[in-house]
Image: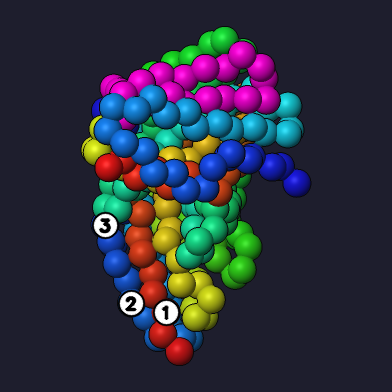
Amino acid sequence: DVKVTQSSRYLVKRTGEKVFLECVQDMDHENMFWYRQDPGLGLRLIYFSYDVKMKEKGDIPEGYSVSREKKERFSLILESASTNQTSMYLCASSPGGNGNTIYFGEGSWLTVV
Amino acid sequence: AQSVSQHNHHVILSEAASLELGCNYSYGGTVNLFWYVQYPGQHLQLLLKYFSGDPLVKGIKGFEAEFIKSKFSFNLRKPSVQWSDTAEYFCAVNFYNTDKLIFGTGTRLQVFP
């Protein structure tokens, strides 16, 4: 079974703090993704990476950055957390190639106060 | 712009009722289509997917979906729902030659015994 593991299920951070969300996958997948999920808005893509040290902006990259130093690990960074970044963050991975299934982690609930 | 629409935001059914959830996408080219389900407190799971071939696709737990190219639609169906189908359902589209999935806003299904 594919396993996508997000390091923290629940976090509470203060406005202005730097926040790291970590994600690890164990299936040697080329692609990794960060989405945020908000009620009524579905899942929106923040960033994705198709190879080590490679990244592309998704639909809502503002206020976020990412790091992929190793193939299995993809980190989402909030440089200065704000209350409008309170959300559920989902990491996902997939093999390279067109149309492969994307596998999701359990999500990280981030509350910024 | 590429987009995915789910017109039913909240559906309430009694057990044994039939279910149909709508999904439409905006792009006219080649697509791969997915339905994901998120049970309360759990991660997103793949319900079914369409890449090519028979436009009627069968998935897990008795779900099926039909791809109608002329209508840009991929509606999800189940002839008789159960209480355990209570969940949020997301339609997603992978537009040809990209590895990104674009999600709809989701449909919350509540099934009462």
Q: Nearer the viewer, residue A3 or B69?
A: A3
**Which quadrant would residue B69 be assigned to in this image?**
top left
User: Where does residue A74 sit, x and y in percent of width and height?
Assistant: 57, 25
Q: Amino acid at mark 3?
A: His
> Of circles 2 and 3, which is in front?
2
Q: Label 3 to label 1, Cα distance in Å?
A: 18 Å
SS assignment at label 2: strand
Q: Amino acid at mark 1?
A: Val
Around disc 3, counting alpha carbons within 10 Å, would you say few (fewer than 14), some (14 to 19), or many (20 or more)? some
Q: Amino acid at mark 2?
A: Ile
User: Where does residue B103 sit, x and y in percent of width and height?
Assistant: 39, 42
In primary-sequence order, the first of circles 2 and 3 is: 3
Give the residue number, with chain letter if any, for mark 1: B111
Give the residue number, with chain letter if any, for mark 2: B12
Q: Nearer the viewer, residue B44 or A66?
A: A66
Q: Label 2 to label 3, Cα distance in Å?
A: 14 Å
Q: Are marks 1 and 2 in contact (CB under 8 Å)?
A: yes
The quadrant of the image that shows the C terminus of chain A is top left
Residue A66 among those drawn in magenta:
yes
Q: Does residue B18 sit above or below B51 in this rendering?
A: below
Give the residue drawn at x 31%, y 30%.
A81
Chain for numbered disc 2: B
Around disc 1, counting alpha carbons within 10 Å, would you say few (fewer than 14), some (14 to 19), or many (20 or more)? some
Answer yes or no: are tags 1 and 2 on the same subunit. Answer: yes
Q: Nearer the viewer, residue B26 or A84?
A: A84
In primary-sequence order, the first of circles 3 and 1 is: 3
Q: Which residues are magenta?
A: A58-81
Tally of numbered tags: 3
Give the residue number, with chain letter if any, for mark 3: B7
